[in-house]
Amino acid sequence: MRYIRQPPSVALRNSVDHLWCIADGPTYSAERILPTGTTELVINLSADAVTITNHQGSQRFSGTVVSGPYARPFDIDASEHTAMVGVHFKPGGVRAVLGVSPDELLGAHINLDAVWNGAVADLRSEVCAAKSITQRLAIVERALLARLHDDRELTREVAFAVNTLSLGRQPPIEKLAREVGFSHRRLIQLFTTQVGMPPKRFARLQRFRHAHDAVSGALSAPHWSIFATEHGYADQSHMIREFQEFSGMTPAEQLRRSGYVAKDDHIALEP
């Protein structure tokens, strides 16, 4: 599998974390996509369709789809997604480019043409016809820049809260609200509207992602109780519950699957 990611141009860096492309893979049959607290735009180059399976069952969308902020994992048939281009937005960044509030996308997928009104088929055709990964990513980036509205970026206080809660160790939400000069209730309201989920759930997801990355990079099983406290959990049982909620697996199960090469925030599922 070839997986390439690149940073966006300067104009997009407040809204987009990176652009990515997959070619020639993966070779396993299924993938689990983990929640990240942010939004993804995906273009399937293999077929004009994207199918996901989540707690609601199987859902089928067009080949150009937006995955909103999720708090639960979902699965895909990897054999149907062997060539793809995507955009990984920063938390809340989708609002500046797609013009839609993240809280409207919470836990949902939508076809991109629902918010881009008719230009999506031409975009996908142009990306599919491109001769190189560099050209494909450039086409997508131009489309994003053409629709960028700087006035829809995160407010200063919410951006500070996002950055603080994305760290390995996070302060209580009440303390964070005081730091930005908001009431507890006001911070929750603005954060939820601009990012798509309440700050406490976002913080739990970021803690899980830090721990997941550490598990994925481990060469052998750590001492799980020590690992749990080092990553901000009350104890091993607390960590296991959080892992099961956000990935459907225990940390040990994730470690067992980490030998498969997968895209960021994806876990390969054995056939």
Image: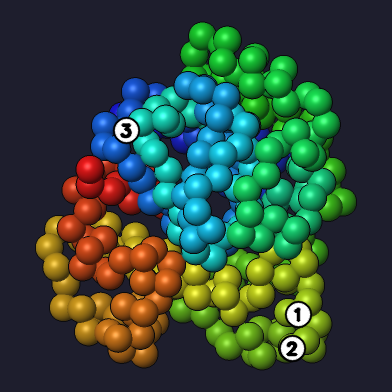
Residue at disc 2, secondary structure:
helix
Which residue is identified by label 1? Answer: 187
Q: Are marks 2 and 1 in contact (CB under 8 Å)?
A: yes
Q: Earlier in the sequence, mark 3 or mark 2?
A: 3
Give amino acid for label 3: Pro
Classed neighbour count for the residue bearing mark 2: other residues with Cα under 10 Å, few (<14), some (14–19), many (≥20): some
Classed neighbour count for the residue bearing mark 3: other residues with Cα under 10 Å, few (<14), some (14–19), many (≥20): many
Q: CA distance from mark 3 to mark 2?
A: 44 Å
Which residue is identified by label 2? Answer: 184
Q: Nearer the viewer, residue 189 or 79?
A: 79
Given the current orientation, which residue lies at the most extreme front position?
57
Which residue is identified by label 3? Answer: 26
Q: Nearer the viewer, residue 112 or 4?
A: 112
Q: CA distance from mark 2 to mark 1?
A: 5 Å
Give amino acid for label 2: His
Q: Nearer the viewer, residue 70 or 38?
A: 70
